[in-house]
Image (tube, rainbow, N blue to C red):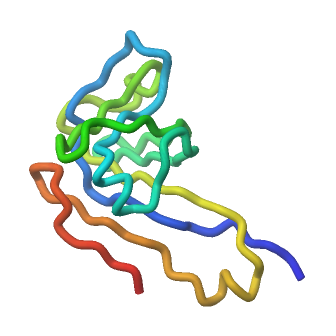
Amino acid sequence: MYTIDILLSKVHGITVTEANLNYQGSLTLDAAIMAAAKMVEYQKVLVVNNNNGERLETYLINGAKGSGVCCLNGAAAYKGTKGDTLIIMTFGYLDEHVASAYKPVRVFIDEKNKIKNIETN
């Protein structure tokens, strides 16, 4: 038996609202979107910028619930600018038998950074 590092959840198509170089680092994300994607504060994430192809690993910080905030902080701010769209993903290790049947939570975001659709199957 072995474990597989598998996609647990993703937020697809969220727009960067701010890039703040003068911060310790992380990604501030609307707490409602985090909850919908089953993401938690300080969780490690992989972020893909759809506008420039950049990828980065960082961690999440709760933003105001319902605000639509998506702020690249610290060094992450060099990887994108306001208006870029991102995919934010979490991964975890699952037993091979669990992983074969697991379906990640996929949260799709509209142009106003509101939840458009949630898929779990």
Say above or below: 100 vs 4: below
Depth check: give the residue in front, 46 or 69.
Answer: 69
Outermost residue to the right: 1
> Farthest front residue?
65
Instruction: Determine the image quadrant of residue 120.
Output: bottom left
The N terminus sits in image quarter: bottom right
Total of numbered circles in the picture?
0
Q: Which quadrant holds the C terminus?
A: bottom left
Q: Residue at x 39, y 62 (%)?
A: 37
Residue 49, placed above or below residue 105: above
Q: Residue at x 22, y 44 (%)?
A: 15
Give how far across and how far down residue 101 sits, in percent. Answer: 60, 89
Q: Quadrant of residue 35?
A: bottom left
Indicate the position of residue 40 as horizontal and vertical percent values.
Answer: 49, 49
Q: Residue furthest left?
A: 112
Q: What is the x, y in percent for residue 89?
A: 47, 56
Q: Horizontally, is 52 left or right of 84 in the view? A: right
The residue positioned 29% from the left and 73% from the top of the image is 118
Q: Which residue does the image show at 32% across and 66% down from the upper left?
A: 107
Location of residue 25 with respect to 48 vertically, above or below: above
The picture places residue 99, in percent across and down from the top left corner, at 66, 81
Left or right: where 19 falls relative to 109: right
